[in-house]
Image (cartoon, rainbow, N blue to C red):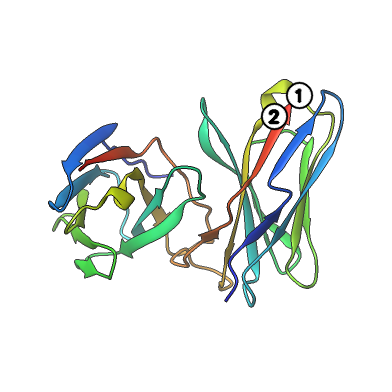
């Protein structure tokens, strides 16, 4: 099976712009989660989508949003970019279940976003 | 979320066993112990998870203390490819919760 794919792999934007990142989960996986990784804050959870519905949300401002399509592919959007949004954005998919946290999450390689 | 405590860094010689400790004194009865690792320039990858009993898979072993307040990830023969940041994470089995990453343990493997 193909792994989790993320596009683009690298992106450079300027402050004030908006950006959309894409994630294709492993075939058959219905849950997609997004994480932000920075040197200062480490890996932080952004949000999770399951069957096109946001199921969990981390502590990020409303500029960060996401959605999931019927084929489980997901996008996240960041509006009005700030310098501090420079980070590696990771997407993870899992098979899951309606409940329970023993499912394994499979991560993509990430999108490296640089905001100038 | 229940918290975990791990050493910031550890070092091992190649082909020797490595024991990576994790303390989780406030663990609840429904918390599973998960381990993920992140190799350089890659996304995290699942290593192993367990609830009460020790667990083995092709990558590693997980030894869980009888009181469940601590656990140890065991790499039986470290290779250079095992150099990574290792994260110990608690997840409640009752609810769909995200992975909450701490700072993890940076493992260096010396040839």
> How many numbered callouts?
2
Say if residue A77 shows up in the picture.
yes
Q: Which residue is mark 1?
A: A82
Q: Residue at x 23, y 69 (%)?
A: B56
Q: Label 2: few (<14), some or many (≥20) within 10 Å? A: some
Task: Please name the residue that numbered disc 2 is placed on.
Answer: A85
Snapshot quadrant of residue A32: bottom right
Judge by depth and name the residue closer to the eye, B85 or B95.
B85
Q: Is residue A4 left or right of residue A73?
A: left
User: In this view of the protein, which residue sits in the foreground, B45 or B99?
Assistant: B45
State if disc 1 and disc 2 touch (CB < 8 Å). yes
Q: Residue at x 63, y 65 (%)?
A: A31
Identity of the residue furthest to the front in this view:
B111
Tell me the residue at 78%/45% (across/down).
A65
Q: How crowded is the residue under tag 1: few (<14 C-alpha within 10 Å), some, or many (20+)? A: some
Identify the residue at horizontal 54%, vertical 69% (top origin): A99
Q: What element does badge 2 sit on? A: helix
């Amino acid at each position: 099976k193909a792994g989790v794919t993320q596009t683009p792999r690298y992106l450079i934007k300027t402050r004030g712009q908006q950006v959309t990142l894409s994630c294709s989960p492993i075939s058959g996986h219905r849950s997609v989660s997004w994480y932000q990784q920075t040197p200062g804050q480490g890996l932080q959870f952004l949000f999770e989508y399951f069957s096109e519905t946001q199921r969990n949300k981390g502590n990020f401002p409303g500029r960060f949003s996401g959605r999931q399509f019927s084929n489980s592919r997901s996008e996240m959007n960041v509006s009005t970019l700030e310098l501090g949004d420079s980070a590696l954005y990771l997407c993870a998919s899992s098979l899951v279940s309606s409940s329970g946290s023993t499912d394994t999450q499979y991560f993509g390689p990430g999108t490296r976003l640089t905001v100038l | 979320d229940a918290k975990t405590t791990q050493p910031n860094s550890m070092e091992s010689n190649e082909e020797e066993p490595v024991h990576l400790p994790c303390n989780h004194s406030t663990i609840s009865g429904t918390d599973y112990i998960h381990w993920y690792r992140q190799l350089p320039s890659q996304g995290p990858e699942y290593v192993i998870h367990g609830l009460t009993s020790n667990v083995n898979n092709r990558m590693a072993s997980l030894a869980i203390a009888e009181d469940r307040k601590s656990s140890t990830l065991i790499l039986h023969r470290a290779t250079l490819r095992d150099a990574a940041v290792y994260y110990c994470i608690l997840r409640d089995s009752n609810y769909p919760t995200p992975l909450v990453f701490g700072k993890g343990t940076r493992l260096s493997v010396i040839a």
